[in-house]
Image (cartoon, rainbow, N blue to C red):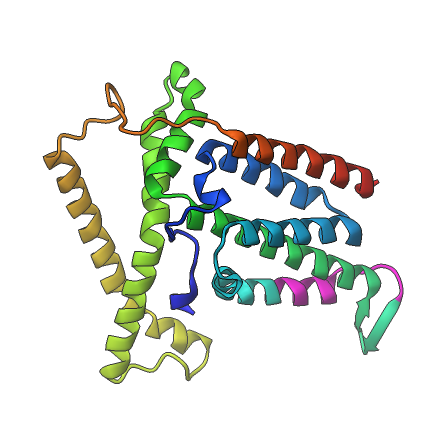
Amino acid sequence: MLQNIAIGQYVPGQSFLHRADPRSKLLFIILFATLVFLANNALTYTVLIAFTLLVALLSRLSLSYILKSLKPVWILILFTVVLHIFITKGGAVYYQWGSFTIEEEGVRQAVFISLRLGLLVLISSLLTLTTSPIDLTEGLERLLGPFGKIGVPVHEIALMMSIALRFIPTLMEETDKIIKAQTARGADFTSGNLVRRAKNLVPIAIPLFINAFRRAEELALAMEARGYRGGVGRTRLNKLSFSWRDTCVAVAGVLLIGVIGWWRS
């Protein structure tokens, strides 16, 4: 499962999504996330799923590779489904066993909430898969630029967010190596009760935190050695500019707003 995390990874390419401006992609992600939470019936979710598949095709990436981003959150999705099925009540009763019942509203909420989580993870994965960390940092900084006039450290915030995304695959890879090393030494992470399994995670957490702090220190020293002093006075080799692709992204956003708003009611 640790090898199937797509969020934070970047795959170089020349597709429509790769060449779109990162600012338009970030704004569209915000809009899409809002529409996901506004969707409230089968038609609106069908539109969102179809649009997500279309965006995946435009990225020219393997659909199976993109869907791998769902594997790390399948436990959360399954827990959410079970929780809503047995707790949310309302509508027709589909099944009853003693005091436990599965009702129409519970099934409906379980399906919709799981779809929300899946769509949000997929669209976020597409953003990082098609946007380099440098472009993502610059796009965040440009979007948050107006807040810099009131003293908000825009450049530092954008840099921290991009570094965090960048190191997600690295930390997962190190976690996988530590698990394999501890397993080779006789550690057992699959048997025992919940308390025992939690205790078995200590040999993983300690070296992982040590490695994370070591990498953070190495990164800070490398940035200082190269004269990094924040975003003041920094220049850029490549300037961001909007193109016809970003116009298409804006039109797609407007169309989605219209369709979801119409079919939602």
Q: Quadrant of residue 140?
A: top left
**Can you give x and y, in whole percent of width and height, for residue 148 in the image?**
38, 19
Left/right of residue 211 with respect to residue 201 in the rendered view: left
**Can you give x and y, in whole percent of width and height, for residue 166 in the image?**
33, 48
> 62 or 178: nearer the eye?
62
**Can you give x and y, in whole percent of width and height, for residue 25 in the image?**
51, 37
Q: From the image, give the main secondary structure of the stretch colored magenta.
A: helix
Magenta stretch: includes residue 1: no
Q: How many marks?
A: 0
**Can you give x and y, in whole percent of width and height, for residue 145 in the image?**
41, 21
Eyeballing the image, is 57 above or below 178? above
Q: Which residues are magenta?
A: 79-92
User: Which quarter of the rendering shows the N terminus?
Assistant: bottom left
Left/right of residue 80 with respect to residue 199 in the rendered view: right
> 163 or 150: nearer the eye?
163
In the rendered image, is residue 181 in sight?
A: yes
